Amino acid sequence: MKHFEYLEPGTVDEACGLLKQYAGNARVFAGGSSLTILLKQGFLQPDALINIKKIDELRRIEESGDDLVIGALVTHHDIETSSLLAERLPVLCELEHDVANIRVRNMATVGGNIASGEPLTDLPCVFITLDATVRIANTSGGRTLPLEEVFLDYYETQLGEDEVLTHVVIPPLPSHSAIDYVRFSSSSVVDKPCIGVAVRMSVNPDDGACGSVRIGLGCVAPTPMRARNAEAVLEGKPLTDENLQAAARAAAEECDPMDDLRGSERYKREMVAALVRRLAPRVYEKAKGQG
């Protein structure tokens, strides 16, 4: 690897200042599970690594009013074992059981998972479906973005050269709502997912029609995405076989997968449709039982 400066700021403000000082030639280091591979392969050759591990305020999972706030340094294992998330959003704990292996889950962080722009990942798909936002610190103070808007393209995000993603903020689920997630790996169960589908749905208790619907798709486009056309097929309508089939077809049509070792474009579209058909009725039944 190329020689680089190794810096350990004690605060977020200090980290942003160092990033500005290096003017795009520095990288934030958190868990390092992805970054170290890119460094060793020569894809990244920064002048400095800015290790933010000592910034304790980014390590917490906590409630803020009705919102859940997850710090950028929270690891996948922290999410997997969080009693607060198990109570409020067990889907996050459950999906982590299938993420990589325990060694990776102990090191890799939520912030790094998002900030890397990695398209083959699980958490951002679910976060988008939950209408999550992110807090971003910079030398001018900071800003908040819908998490979906962070991603621009393969491994490309909105984060500026002096910016650090600090927190993910998740609003409470609407009443009579439920969410679930399914991932499919075409090779090994510990491999990166080939496809991820998350569905969040509320149910009108008066007539049983679908209320608000979110369908998140991962690994089948340059970025995690919402299948908005598929959502529109179901919102305000009963979950009939006809509507479910139409929503599944819409999701398959609006994603943008590519041929690779995990499957062909056609295969991935068919799998998206199959997983939407499988997951939506399950979430609907869960939502019917929620107050």
Image (spheres, helix red, strand yellow):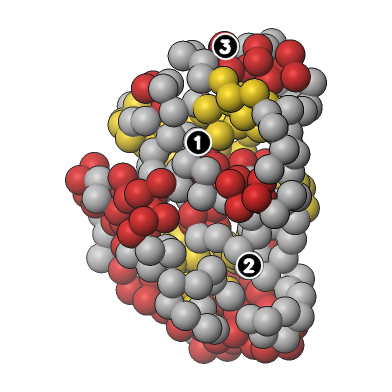
In the image, residue 59 lies at what x, y percent? Answer: 37, 30
**Is residue 78 visible in the rendered structure shown here?**
yes
106 vs 291, left or right, is: right
| Residue 14 circle label | 3
Which residue is depicted at the point 75% across and 50% down?
43
Look at mark 2 in the image and give the residue it sits on: 219
Please tell me in which quadrant of the rendered image residue 18 appears.
Answer: top right
State the quadrant of the C terminus.
bottom left
Above or below for 212 versus 111:
below
Q: Is 167 or 66 nearer to us in this picture?
A: 167
Q: Is 20 or 282 nearer to us in this picture?
A: 20
Q: Identity of the amino acid at label 1?
A: Ala
Look at mark 1 in the image and give the residue it sits on: 30
Q: Element under label 3?
A: helix
First of labels 1, 2 by sequence position: 1
Q: Is 129 or 141 nearer to us in this picture?
A: 141
Q: Element under label 1?
A: loop
Q: Element under label 2?
A: loop
Please tell me in which quadrant of the rendered image residue 92 appears.
Answer: bottom left
